[in-house]
């Protein structure tokens, strides 16, 4: 997995350039009720990093799906297990990491949804992949999975300057 260690850069807020601290981290336990606290924290954190409101909603959905997957799959629904979410930004992108310490994600076992039928499962990760400009995961660790979502700022990233950018569906 590629490490993103670029320090945070200035951001525009209320038409003034300010600096966001290096990034924030949220810790929760593996209960669905904790997702409400996560969403409130994440919305505030994303706004503080200058994420546009439309993208905030998409990223809230993506992070919520990854946390729900940690609860359901990594921890088999057991409560009280740790999940950490962190946010940081650069001049070009926002980076969100979701980390659990349960069973690692096994890409070999993942089956994406059948989009021609009503999917029973696999749709959450499909949505995350659709929302993120880049999604990676790290299971080469002692325990668990660390997911990394990268979302580029408008006009930034690899697709910047190449046609109209990434199509949205």
Image (tube, rainbow, N blue to C red):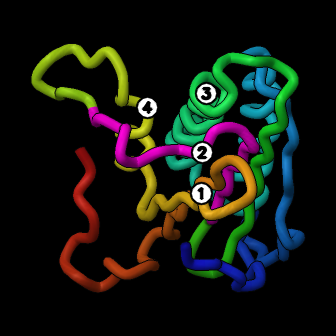
Residue that label 3 marks: 68
Q: Nearer the viewer, mark 2 or mark 3?
A: 2
Say which residue label 4 marks: 124
Q: Looking at the picture, how far across and down is residue 31, in whole percent?
A: 77, 19
Label located before the other in sequence (3 or 1) = 3
Q: Is mark 3 on a helix, strand or loop?
A: helix
Secondary structure beneath dot 1 equals loop
Residue 37 pos. (x, y %): 82, 27
The answer to whether the residue labelled 2 contacts the one labelled 1, judged by CB atoms less than 8 Å apart, is yes
The Cα atoms of the two marked residues, 2 and 4, are separated by 17 Å
- Badge 2 crowding class, 10 Å Cα cut-off, few under 14, some 14 to 19, many 20 or more, is many
Between the residue at mark 3 and the residue at mark 1, the CA separation in whole angstroms equals: 18 Å
Q: Is mark 4 on a helix, strand or loop?
A: helix
State the predominant SS element of the stretch in magenta: loop
For the residues marked 4 and 1, what is the alpha-carbon distance in whole angstroms? 19 Å
Query: Does label 2 or label 1 sit earlier along the sequence?
Result: 2
């Amino acid at each position: 997995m590629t490490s993103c260690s670029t320090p945070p850069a200035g951001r525009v807020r209320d038409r003034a350039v300010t600096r966001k601290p290096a990034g924030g981290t949220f810790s929760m336990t593996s209960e669905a009720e904790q997702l409400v606290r996560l969403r409130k924290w994440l919305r505030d954190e994303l706004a503080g990093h200058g994420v546009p409101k439309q993208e905030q909603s998409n990223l809230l959905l993506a992070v919520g799906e990854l946390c729900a997957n940690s609860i359901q799959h990594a921890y088999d629904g057991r409560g009280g297990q740790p999940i950490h979410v962190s946010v940081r930004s650069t001049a070009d992108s926002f980076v969100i990491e979701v980390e659990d310490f349960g069973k690692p994600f096994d890409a070999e076992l993942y089956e994406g949804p059948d989009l021609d039928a009503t999917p029973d499962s696999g749709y959450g990760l499909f949505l995350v992949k659709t929302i993120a400009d880049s999604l990676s995961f790290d299971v080469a660790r002692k325990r668990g999975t660390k997911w990394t979502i990268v979302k580029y700022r408008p006009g930034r990233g690899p697709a910047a300057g190449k046609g109209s950018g990434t199509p949205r569906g």
